[in-house]
């Protein structure tokens, strides 16, 4: 009962954001903690500043997920941000931004959504993941 | 000799379907079972009803894989459905559809290809994966 | 201190090549070896022959990564090939090409970049990965 499952959330389309967000709702008895590490397009999807969401970069990375998004809403499913907030209420879900991706996207921690708990490097991510599962989405 | 390797097959393009289908041909001595969990575009690629294959949704998700498909056929390689059937004959390969994805795509189990063994939720998937490897494709 | 982390590098866009290349810079104390297995688009990105880089196949697979590439260069980050060479100097990083993908892409080992250490099949890959982590990028 002390394992971590770590998700590297690299993609920024709604379909994959939803796949990443629903995973930590699963709480197998041997898993005490989920970790989500935000890289590139995944990080780009977590800005607190609303205007960033209209940037061309996001527009392009989101294209693939649009049909999905409408289908999910019609099926009465929660959005990925709602799902993540719910997962955080139900158990430990630690969301960290990749420091190298922060530099590429010219983001400061104050730019990020309050869902993000902190910033760390790739080396720290692999050390914290330990010998638990790593899922790259 | 009792480990499971679990594939979350999220993508629906021919190139990634082929990557997922060839994996269970590998039978390392400590692996007794492969599991494939079909989500979204991956699930969408497994319909038994042929007409679904012509839908716009699939057309779009498949675009990326077309060049690949022709290359594979020219190299004399089996299609991904043939490869999966072969893998099932050679050892235990359990293919489950994600229940939340079924709702989004408005699919019933009777709509799915006979390769699919059943339907389960995300929580059940992570419990059944146990502490074995999880590969997200 | 004798674990392997294995990356299946399936994607061939610059953003994902960079994600794969930076991972082996992480050297958690229990990891002695990184393995990168090149499939399809990932393999296609490693040709030694420069002319292949201009093929339509690569052009298409790269499209998604272009905005990323410029952002990374502006942030003063090394290219993914530079990063991989650095990772190889710092510790054991074994890069193998997938034999089935070699056939599809009609490549011989002499066509590949000197970063590639050899060619192996999918079954050998899973046996060599052992019970260590597998990350599909």
Image (cartoon, coloured by chain):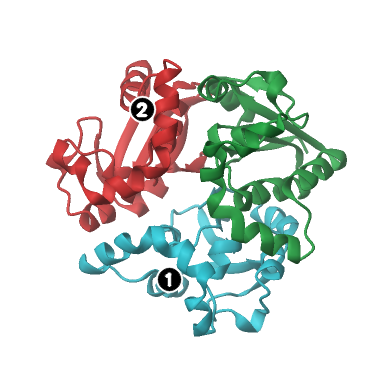
Chain colours: A red, B green, C cyan
Task: State whether residue A75 is above or below residue A71.
Answer: above
B107 versus C102 height, above or below: above
Q: From the top left corner, tell me how far across and down residue A82 is, in percent.
A: 32, 21
Residue C46 position (above or below residue B5): below
Residue at x-position 60% and y-position 75%: C117
Q: Residue at x 52, y 39 (%)?
A: A133
Q: Which mark is residue B94?
A: none
Residue A15: image x %, image y %? 43, 35
Could you classify mark 2 by the number of other residues whose Cα lies within 10 Å: few (under 14), some (14-19), or many (20 or more)? some
Q: Which mark is residue C90?
A: 1
Task: Choose mark 2 or mark 1, whichever is in front.
Answer: 2
| Residue A80 numbered mark, or none | 2
Point out residue C110 in the picture as x, y percentages from the top left corner.
64, 84
Q: Chain of mark 1?
A: C
Tell me where residue C114 appears, x and y as whole percent: 54, 81
Rendered residue at 53%/49% (across/down): C135
> The residue tagged with tag 1: helix, strand or loop?
helix
> Is residue C14 shown left or right of residue B107?
left
Rendered image quadrant of residue B87: top right
In the displayed structure, does residue A108 sit left or right of residue A101? left
Q: Is residue B11 left or right of residue A94?
A: right
Taking depth in this image into account, of B11 and B112 the one nearest to the observer is B112
């Amino acid at each position: 009962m002390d394992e971590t499952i770590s998700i590297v959330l690299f993609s920024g389309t709604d379909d994959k954001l939803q796949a990443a967000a629903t995973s930590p709702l699963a709480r197998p008895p041997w898993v005490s903690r989920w970790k989500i590490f935000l890289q590139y397009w995944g990080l780009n999807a977590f800005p607190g500043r609303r205007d960033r969401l209209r940037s061309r970069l996001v527009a392009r990375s989101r294209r693939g997920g649009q049909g999905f998004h409408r289908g999910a809403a019609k099926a009465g499913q929660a959005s990925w941000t709602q799902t993540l907030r719910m997962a955080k209420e139900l158990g430990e879900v630690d969301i960290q931004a990749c420091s190298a991706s922060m530099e590429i996207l010219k983001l400061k921690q104050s730019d990020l959504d309050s869902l993000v708990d902190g910033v760390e490097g790739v080396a720290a991510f692999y050390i914290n993941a330990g010998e638990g599962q790593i899922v790259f989405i």
